[in-house]
Image (spheres, coloured by chain):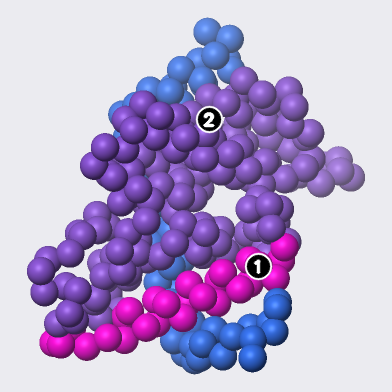
Chain colours: A blue, B purple
Amino acid sequence: MPVAGGTPARDRAVSDIKRRQIDRAMKMAFEETLNEPLPDDLARLVDALKKKERGE
Amino acid sequence: MSTDSKPEPVENPEEQLLALLPALRGYARSLASDAATADDLVQETVLKAWSNLGQYRPGTNMRAWLFTIQRNTFFSLVKKRRREVEDVDGEMAARLEQKPQQDAAMEMRDFKRAFATLPMEQREVMTLIAAGVQYDEAAEICGCAIGTVKSRLNRARARLAEMLDEDPSEPSEPEKSGGNCVAA
């Protein structure tokens, strides 16, 4: 019987190897996003904010 | 570097905010699941944060502050869009809740596809942890207990493992009719 706040058996089923693979893939996917160029709208917004910061 | 006894000089909040923009995009993807909505969300978040920078306490965690704003902004946007579009085709709902897709190999494309099928709460926790956010910080951002963060993370991993372990040569029943495609 599941205990409130406990970890169901299904949750424990992921092996350490699998977990590391998944975590590594997740990190890569996230880092991929970090390296993507900003879309035009966002790049324009950033430029505008930078100008504002410099008081232009 | 600095001859002062103090630690590294703190960047000004504006610079910090702009430097965290890529991380905001990464987190937005976990909330919105399609790139266009995610970028709209980042834009709204940056504008909101910029105009409220006076409320940010220097020296505290800017990333957690921004992620919290982004999360709140996401839920406001969803509500607003639901009202505007009335979600006629269930398009927004489909974006937010993708159906599980059967795919196997541990390749990035398959991973992203599988990831997009996770419930938003699980996607966001996985993204926060991948971004290097600590459990307690993630709990604060998501407004839940640390145990909930861990549990969501475990469920997400288990679900991804299930999806990615499935044999692609065996088409599953729901996919035969060509189910919902997920934009990775």
Tell me the element at label 1: helix
Q: Quadrant of the C terminus of chain B?
A: bottom left
Magenta stretch: dominant secondary structure: helix
Q: Is residue B158 magenta?
A: yes
Q: Is residue A38 visible?
A: no
Residue B29 position, x and y percent, is 41, 50
Q: CA distance from mark 2 to mark 1?
A: 28 Å
The residue that appears at 24% across and 54% down in the rendered structure is: B183
Please state the extent of the stretch shown in magenta in the rendering.
B145-170
Which residue has dot 2 on it? B46
Residue A25 position, x and y percent, is 40, 72
Mark toward the start of the polypeptide (2 vs 1): 2
Asked if residue B56 lies left or right of residue B74, the reply is: right
Asked if residue B170 lies left or right of residue A13, the reply is: left
The residue lying furthest to the top in this view is A56
Residue type at the position of mark 1: Thr
